[in-house]
Image (tube, rainbow, N blue to C red):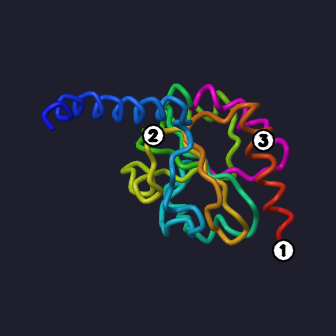
Amino acid sequence: MTRWKLFIPLLLFLALGAFLLRGLFMDPTLLPSPLIGKPLPAFTLGTLADPAGVKRQSDLTGEVALVNVWATWCISCRAEHPWLMKIAAMGVPIYGVNYKDQREAALTWLKQLGDPYRFSLFDESGRLGLDLGVYGAPESYLIDRHGVIRYKRVGVIDERIWRDELEPAINRLRAEP
C-alpha cells in the first residue's frame, strides 16, 4: 500500500503536464465571449469628432457591420489600420470605439492614417469596453442587422483573418433574411 503513495507525485506531474501541453495548441485570439448571440451593450456616448453628437446602440443597427475597438497607444492597432481602410473601401460599414484614449491624439491619428469608420465612439473612461468584455485593443465585433454580436476577434485583422474568417461570416450574415 505504501508503494502506491510513491507514484502520486508522478501522476500529479503527468496530469499537470498534459493540461499545460493542451494549452500550447489553443489559439489565444479565440477567447470565448458571453456576448456572442446577445445584443450590443446599451450605451450613450459622444463621437470622437463631435462630443455633442451622442450615439446609442440603435445607431449601429440596420446592416451587418464591424465594431472595432482601437486606440492610438495600441501598436497593433497601427498594424491593423491599413486593412480596416481596405475593408471599408469594400463597402463594409465599420464603427470605431476609441478606447481609453486622448481625443486630440485620436483625431490626429485618423487625419494622418485615414478614417475607415462611419463614426468613432469616444470611450474615454472605458465603460463600453468593459461592457463588451474588452481584454485590450484591437478587438473587433461583427454585428448583424439587429445589432446582435455574432463574432468576436481579439487581435489584429489582417489579410488571412479577412479572407478566412471575416469575409465569409459577413457574406453569411448578409444572406440571412
The residue drawn where x is 50% and y is 38% is: 137
- Rounded to the nearest whole Å, what is the CA distance between mark 1 and mark 2? 33 Å
Frontmost residue, 103 versus 28: 28
Q: Does 44 appear above or below 3?
A: below
Query: Residue 73: image x %, image y %?
Result: 46, 30
Q: Main secondary structure of the magenta part?
A: helix
- Rounded to the nearest whole Å, what is the CA distance between mark 3 and mark 1? 23 Å
Q: The C terminus lies in which quarter of the figure?
A: bottom right
Circle 3 or circle 1, nearest the eye: 1
Is 38 a magenta residue? no
Frontmost residue, 59 versus 77: 77
- Rounded to the nearest whole Å, what is the CA distance between mark 3 and mark 2? 21 Å
Q: The N terminus lies in which quarter of the figure?
A: top left
Extent of the magenta region: 77-95
Is 84 a magenta residue? yes
Left or right position of 129 against 85: left
The residue drawn where x is 56% and y is 36% is: 27
Residue topped by disc 1? 177
Q: Residues within 10 Å of mark 2 (few under 14, many from 20)?
A: some
Left or right position of 165 against 137: right
The label on residue 136 is 2
The residue drawn where x is 76% and y is 53% is: 169
Residue topped by disc 3? 87
Secondary structure beneath label 3: helix
